[in-house]
Amino acid sequence: MVGGAGTLVTHGRLAMRAAVLDAARRNDHGLRVCAFEQLAARLAGGFICPIDTDALLAAVREALGATTLGELDEIKALPGMAHAAAETLRKAWRAEIDLQARAADHPRIGSLAALERAVVESLPAGMLRPGDIVAAAMARMRFAPAIFGPNVEIRGLTELSPVWRPLLRRLAEVVSVTWTAGPREVPAWLDGFAVNVVRGPTHDPKISIVSTATALHGVVEAVRWARELLASGRAKPQEIGIASTNTANYDDHVLALRADANLDIHFAHGIKAVTTRDGQVAAALADILVHGLSQNRARRLSLLSDGDRSPFASLPQGWTRILPEDAPLRSIEKWRQFLSSVPAEAWPGGTDHSTELLRLLELLNRGTAAAQEAGEMFLSGRSLAIWRKALLQNPHSAIDAAIEEFRIDDSLDACVSIAWMPAEALAVSPRKFVRLLGLSSRGWPRQVSEDRLLSDHIVPTAELDPLPVSAADRRDFRTILATTEAEVVLSRPRRDSEGRLLGRSPLLHDRGEETYLRRTRTPQHAMSETDRMLARPAEFAQQLQAQSAAACWRDWSASSITAHDGLVRSDHPVIRAVLARTQSASSLRKLLRDPLGFVWKYGFGLRAPEIEEEPLVLDPPMFGNLVHGLLERAVRLIETRGGLSRADAAALQAALEEVRPALQREWEARQAVPPAVIWRRTLSEAVSLAHAALSHPESSLDGQRSYAEVKFGSDDAAASETVPWDPRSPVEVPGTGLRIGGYIDRLDLSADHGAARVRDYKTGKPPKKPVELDGGKELQRCLYAFAVKALLGQHVAVDASLLYPRSALLLRMKSPDETLGSLKNHLCAARDNLAAGRAVAGPDSADEYNDLAFALPANAPNNYCRRKETGIAALLGPATEVWEAP
C-alpha cells in the first residue's frame, strides 16, 4: 500500500474516485491517483499528454477530408468513418504496430499509414501517441523518484496494453513498484519484471443464479434486490453494484426505474445527454438541420431554447400563436409565403417580427452545412458543449445520431450511491454486493469481431487486438466473483427485446441450478410504491383508483348501460353548456348518431392527434374543402361580371383559372399539401369538378343573384355585402331550442327574395338511391333550409338539394315540409335524451373513421358496441328512429 508522496495507478473514473476518497479518509496527503497513461505522460514531462478522444476525432475528421487514402477514399465520407478510423489507430498504437514501417505490406495498411501521418501532424504539439510518450518517458526515467515518490502502486488492473509494458519494466528498476492484485489474476508477462506482486485471498461470496423474462424484468428484479439490501440494513448504497458487459441494452430501463424507485443509482459510464434538457435542446436543433424545417420542429426548438440568450428571445412571448394549426410549413418558401400573409396586428404586441423570424429560419434551412454556425447561435452553456463534441464524432450530416449516443455525467456521487456500471469498471472497483445482468449466450462474453478497417487477413486480429473483448469479459467475470465479499447474483434474460429465446452464458455452466423468476411474481420486497401495490392486490383493491378501474371494466363487460357508458345526472352543467352553443351540421350529426362522441368532442374538447407529415394525397374532406374554396371565389368573381345565371362555360372556366393561384398560395401557406406533381394534378381535378358544379343546368330565378359559402348564425361575423342577411343574426331550429350556424355552399335568390335555391355540393360518390336524412348523416340541406326561412321569412319558397358534380346527379328533397318536420322531431328527441343524462354511444362510434375511437374500449366496433347495442336502443327510445330514416 502506497502512502505519503507515493503514486497510485488504477483504471476508470469510479476506481479513481474511490481511491481519492479512501486517501482523504486516511489523511494521506500528497498521494497521486492516476491512470497508467497519465503516469507515462507525467514522466515524459513538459506539456505532453495522451491523445484524448475528442482531439483524435477532430484530427481524423480533418485528415479524412484533406488526405488521399487510396482504397479508403471511396468510404472516407461515410457516417461513422471517423470513429472507425480513430478506433483502428488506437488499436494499432496500443498493440505497438508500426504502420509506417509496414505501409508497403498491404494497400490498406498504406492508407492508414497516410492517415496516421496526417493525424499526427494536425494534433497539438504536446499530444503524442502512446509509443511516443513511452519513448519520451524512458528518456526522463532518472526523474521518476522525484515525480512519483519512492513507491508506485498499481491496483485493480488485470492487464496492461503491450505498448506500456516496456515502460513498466524500466520504471520498476528505478522506483519500488507494487502490483496489488489481491484475489485477481496476475498476467503472465509480468514474470521477470522487478515488480512486487501482492496477492490476496479470494473471496467466497454467496452465488445465486436467476433467469428473468426480459432485460426490463431483469432490471426490475435488480432494483428490488437493491432496495431489499438497503431496507434490511445488510448493505449501504456504496456497497451495492449492478453491472453488465453491454450496458446500452439496460440503460433506459435503469434510468426509468431509478426514478420510479426514488433511489440514487449512479451511472458510472454516464447517462445519455438526450435524457437532460441541455441534450434535448441540442437534439431539437439537430433534428431541424438533418430532417429539415417544419412547424413542429421550430416550435420545439423555440420552447426548449427559451431564455435570455436564445435567439428566439427577440420575438414576443407567445409568438407561436400566429402559426396555423394545420400547416406543417416544411420549407423556407412555405414560411415566407405564410409570414407575408400575417398582418402586423396578428403578432403579440401588434409589431411585425417576420424579418427577425425569417433570419433565424433561413440559417436553420441551410441544414447540416451550417451546423457549426447554428450551434453557436442557438445553443449556449452545456448544450453548446454537447454540440461541439458531437460534431467531432461524426460528419455533420449525422449530428443527430452523434447527439443520441453522447453521454454526460449524471451528477450523483459514486462513493455514496448504488452504482450501475460496465463489468470492467466493477472488476477494478469491487463492491460487497453485486448483481450481474445479461449473462446470456449472446451477451456475456461478447463475441470477438474483426476490425472494421484492418481485417484479419491484413493484420491478424490476435496481433491487432491482443486483449480481445471476449477474453476480457471472461477475465472480468472471474475477477468480480473473486473480489466480491458477500453476495453475487447472476441474472440472465430468457428472451431478447424481439421475443427470441436466449441461451445461458457458458460462464454459468457448472454453477448450479437457476431460479426461474416469473415477470408477474409477487416480490418479497417491492422496489417502489407501484410495485408494492401490484404485489398486494387486496390493498390495491381498497384504493379509489383501483375501485374505479375495476368498476369500469365490469361495466364495459356488461350488456346493461351504466355510468361508464355515458350515463350522467340530469341537467349536467357540461351538457347544458354544450347544448347552448351554436351547432353546426357536423355537431348535430354527432348529437343524433353518437351522443357520447358529441359530449367528448364539444363538451370535453377531445380531438385526435394531428399528423405533421405532408400527405401523399388530400383526404376526401380536405379535397372537398378545396373545391368549396374554388366555388366560393369563382361565384363571387362571376357575380361582379354579370351574374352566375348569365355566365357561359368559357366564363366559368376563366373565373376558376383566375381564382386558382390565390387559393393555391393560401393553401400552401396554411395547409399540408401533397408533393408538387400530385398537388398540381389535385388542383386541376378540383377546378374541373368546380366547373361541373357551376355549369350544372338549372332554371334561372327572376332577377337571380348567387352567393357562395354564405355565413349564418355566427357570433363573430361582420355584416357584408356578399351575404344577403346579417350573419350575426341567431338562427334556431323551430321548437328545438338549438341554435345553428355555418356556411351554405351556394344560395340563389330571386330579386324579391320570394324564392331561394340552396345547393349543397358533394365531391364524393353519389348514393345508390335518393336520400332524405340518410339515418341522420345528411343534414346540411335541411339546416340550410331552416336558416333561409328564419332569416328571410317563412314565406320564402326554398328548393334544397344535393349536387354530386362527379356524376351530375341532383337530389331534391321530395317533401321538404315533411322532412324538415321529421328532422325537428329527431333533434328534440336527441336533445331531451342528452339533457336527461343519456350520453351513450351511437352507430357512428363504431364507424371505421371515428376520430374519437381512441377513447373507446379496444376493438369497440366488434365487442363493446355490439354488446351495448340492445341496451342503448332501449334507453334512447324514439331517438333511435333517425338511424333508420331514409
Image (cartoon, helix red, strand yellow):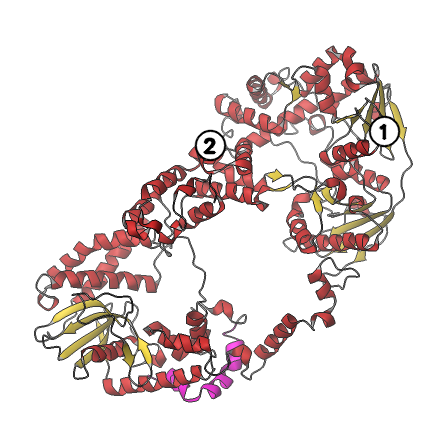
- Rendered position, 432 above or below 72: below
Is 369 or 617 nearer to us in this picture? 369
Identified by mark 2, the residue type is Gln
Quadrant the C terminus occupies: bottom left
**x, y percent for residue 757:** 17, 76
Quarter of the image where one finds residue 85: top right
Q: What residue is drawn where x is 74% and y is 11%?
A: 140
Is residue 213 visible to the viewer in this orientation of the structure?
yes
Task: Tell me the quarter of the picture where residue 707 sits.
Answer: bottom left
Provide the secondary structure element on which disc 1 rests. Answer: strand
Expressed as whole percent of the image width and height from the top left, the position of residue 828 reads 36, 85
Q: Quadrant of the N terminus?
A: top right
The magenta segment is 860-886
Sequence-earlier tag: 1 or 2: 1
Front residue (pair 390, 324): 324
> What is the number of the mark on residue 372?
2
Residue at numbered disc 1:
180
How many numbered discs?
A: 2
List x then y, in percent, for residue 83. Answer: 58, 31
Q: Quadrant of residue 603?
A: bottom left
Q: Which of 275 and 164 is in front in this view?
A: 275
Residue 341: image location, x then y, percent: 27, 50
Tell me the number on the disc at residue 596: none
Position of 730 with respect to 110 (left or right) is: left
